[in-house]
Image (cartoon, grey):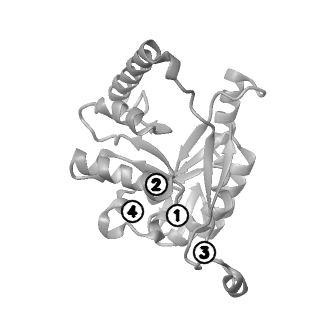
Amino acid sequence: MDKPEQGFDLLQNAVNTVCGTDEHYFDYAVQMGPYETFDYIRGRYEVATGLLKTPDELVDTYADWIEAYPRCIMLIDPFRYADKPSLSRLCDRVSNKCYVTSTDIRRYRNENNNDDDQNTINCHLLSLDSGPTMTEFIQQANALRETNGYALGLFERDHQEVAQVHLADMAVGFGCRFIKLPGFLSLGGQRTSAILQRLSIIRDEIETNDDDQLEWPKQHEFIHIRSSIDTTESETIVSPTPTNAKTKDKKKRP
């Protein structure tokens, strides 16, 4: 493709063809490849062949995409882990309209689990690699939910050789908003089929045994993360909270 917008147009047209433009059945997420697209010599991201952008310029590009393609409700790995300032500015621009998250497990390790990391996402995306043991993983996931109330999702890495079918049970138990799985045509396609089959079984069991208590998923609630990086001195003086604190605004999207 000559430009990234063509990919968005392809997805948007496919969704509109399936469910029309009036009804709202499908949303989609876009996972970037920040380490693959970053030109370490020039210090810029190559978002298309010959098109280089600085991290701050890429913030504007992402914000334009989210504005133009409202059914894209999640950006995964928009920047490298080292580009936290740009990631924080991106959250300030778009986190009231979509989820911003990362698959980089460094932000969830104890030595790096600080406010700086949590100010650059509004959604947790965890893999089983995030915890050394299953017990510690569950404790970590519960602690994250209690800390800031961000949406929670699970994902399976492509290098897993055996389908982690229990990922489906954990997602239901945690009340996750989504699971990120390998594509059907990828090497992990069979694992994806097994997990989706397990989800179908769980759904049927719930409908059969607890139909009266079955609740449909609630609307997405995007927590707006305000960037503290660009706060002016005058704003800091009148602010009732410290400059490094985040203000969370919840905005619902169907």
Q: Nearer the viewer, residue 5 or 149?
A: 149
CB atoms at circles 4 and 3 under 8 Å apart?
Answer: no
Q: Which mark is residue 120?
A: 1
CB atoms at circles 4 and 1 under 8 Å apart?
Answer: yes
Q: Position of residue 23 (x, y in %)?
A: 74, 26
Q: Nearer the viewer, residue 198 or 174?
A: 174
Amino acid tagged 4: Arg
Q: Position of residue 135 (x, y in %)?
A: 23, 47
Specify the quadrant of the image occupied by residue 96: bottom right
Return the disc, 4 or 2, that comes first in the chain's sequence: 2
Q: Secondary structure at mark 3?
A: loop
Residue 40 seen in render = no
Q: How many numbered discs?
A: 4
Residue that label 2 marks:
102
Residue that label 4 marks:
107
CB atoms at circles 2 and 3 under 8 Å apart?
Answer: no
Specify the quadrant of the image occupied by residue 112: bottom left
Q: Position of residue 121 (x, y in %)?
A: 52, 59
